[in-house]
Amino acid sequence: FWYAALVYLAKVIWDSVKGQLVGKTLFPSVKKTEIIIRRYRKFQLKYDEYIQYILNKDYLFKSSKQRKHFLCLLYAIMIYEAHTRPAWIRILEYCVKIVYPFRKMSLGIMQVQTRNWIGNKMSIHHAVEKLYAVFSEVDPSNKIEMSIRDYNPSDHYCEQVTSIYGELSQYLNLP
C-alpha cells in the first residue's frame, strides 16, 4: 500500500511541476537551444563511449553521414525521454519494479518497455536495436520521422523529438 501511495504522490507532484515547465512545446522557446545543447553534451560525455562501442560492434551504416544522423536521432530521443522522465521519476519506477518484478514497464533513460530489470545503458542498447531496425530499412527521405514514429507513434512525441533533432543537427552541422 505504501509503495502505491508513494508512486501516486510522486505522479501528482510530477504532473503539477511538469505543467509549469512545459507549454505548447517541450522547452521554453528562449532557452530551447541552450537546454538541448547542454543536455546533449552531458549525455554525450556520459554515454558516447558505450554507444560507439555498440554501434561499432553490431551495426553497419551505409555512410558516416548516415551514422551521424542516427546518433543525432538517438540523442534527440534521449534528451526528450530524460526531460519527461527525470532521474527521480526513474528511481520511483525501479521501486515499483522491485514490488512488481514481472510487470512490463518502461525503464532506463530511453524508457524501453521490458519485463526485465535494466539500467540506463541497457535501455540505450535496446533503443539502438529498435531504432536501427527502422532507420536502416526505410526510404532516406523520411527515415527520421519513421524511426521516431516506430519508437513512439504519438504525434506530440514525434513533433517534440523532431524539433530536438533539428536543433541538434544544426548544432552538429549535419548535412
Image (cartoon, grey):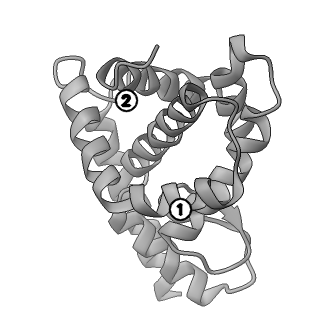
Q: Where is residue 121 in the image (x, y as percent from the top left)?
A: 51, 68
Between residues 5 and 91, which one lies in front from this camera angle? 91
Q: In which quarter of the image is residue 98?
A: bottom right
Q: How far apart are marks 1 and 2 (CA)?
A: 30 Å
Q: Where is residue 143 in the image (x, y as percent from the top left)?
A: 69, 22
Q: Residue at x 39, y 48 (%)?
A: 15
**Which amino acid, by three-letter code, is at mark 1?**
Tyr
Q: Residue at x 40, y 55 (%)?
A: 48
Q: Which residue is drawn at 55% across and 31% down?
A: 64
Find residue 119 and name its label. none
- Left or right of 166 in this view: 118: right
| Residue 133 can be seen in this image | yes
**Which amino acid, by three-letter code, is at mark 2?**
Leu
- Left or right of 133 in this view: 105: left
Between residues 75 and 2, which one lies in front from this camera angle? 75
Query: Which residue, as the protein is rendered here, is positioned at the far front?
Result: 63
**Above or below for 146 versus 44:** above
Between residues 45 and 105, which one lies in front from this camera angle? 45
- Left or right of 66 in this view: 31: left
Q: Position of residue 51 (x, y in %)?
A: 50, 57
Q: How crowded is mark 1: few (under 14 residues within 10 Å), some or many (20 or more)?
A: few
Q: Residue at x 26, y 51 (%)?
A: 42
Q: Label 2: state its secondary structure.
A: loop
Find residue 53 and name its label. 1
Residue holding disc 2: 26
